[in-house]
């Protein structure tokens, strides 16, 4: 992804108000555009196939198919898909599960606007991005793996 390139985003969350708010925050940046939205994992897969966005933002908890399962399915279609998991759950297990599902990024809904922007940009460049909660969870899991 070169300089001046528009970052095309698929945004999936089961709450319309949340999608509207996140979309508004993302589109404040001239180089970010939400090109598709979904309210569940199945719709996210369909939109991914149709739009082939640069970044897929998936809420973990959605009806019909959760974000973790949708991430695994999307990655089975395109192993280079750039997925950023979004959740309201601060528990460590969700960050570990997101990374195991193949997500490049993990943030909570309590994140700052600046961190959301940074996360999307990093994931678009295929760089891993974990919120502070995510870093703590994954590092704790790695350190305690042998015990």
Image (cartoon, grey):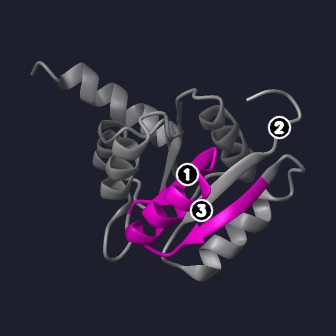
- Residue 116 visible? The answer is yes
Of callouts 3 and 1, the N-terminal one: 3
* Image x and y of residue 147, in percent: 9, 22
Which mark, residue 81? Answer: none
Which mark, residue 5? Answer: 2
Of callouts 3 and 2, the N-terminal one: 2
Q: Residues within 10 Å of mark 2 (few under 14, many from 20)?
A: few
Q: What residue lies at 64% left-to-right and 44% top-to-bottom?
A: 54
Circles 1 and 2 in contact, beta carbons < 8 Å: no
Q: Nearer the viewer, residue 51 or 38?
A: 51
* Quadrant housing residue 20: bottom right
* Image x and y of residue 53, in percent: 62, 50
* 84 with respect to 78 (left or right): right
Which mark, residue 56? Answer: 1
The residue pinned by badge 3 equals 11
Q: Where, quadrant-wise, is the N terminus in this rendering? A: top right
Find numbered disc 3 in the image and state the secondary structure of the residue it sits on: strand
Circles 3 and 1 in contact, beta carbons < 8 Å: no
What segment carries the magenta color?
33-60
């Amino acid at each position: 992804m070169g300089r001046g390139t528009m970052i095309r985003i698929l945004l999936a969350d089961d709450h319309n108000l949340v999608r509207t708010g996140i979309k508004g925050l993302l589109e404040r940046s001239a180089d970010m555009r939400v090109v598709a939205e979904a309210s569940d994992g199945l719709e996210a897969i369909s939109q991914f196939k149709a739009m082939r966005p640069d970044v897929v933002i998936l809420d973990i908890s959605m009806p019909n198919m959760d974000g973790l399962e949708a991430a695994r399915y999307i990655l089975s279609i395109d192993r280079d898909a750039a997925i950023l998991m979004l959740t309201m759950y601060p528990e460590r297990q969700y960050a570990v599960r997101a990374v195991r599902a193949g997500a490049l990024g993990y943030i909570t809904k309590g994140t700052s606007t600046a961190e959301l922007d940074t996360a999307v940009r990093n994931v678009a460049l295929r760089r891993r991005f974990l919120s502070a909660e995510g870093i703590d969870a994954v590092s704790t899991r790695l350190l305690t793996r042998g015990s």
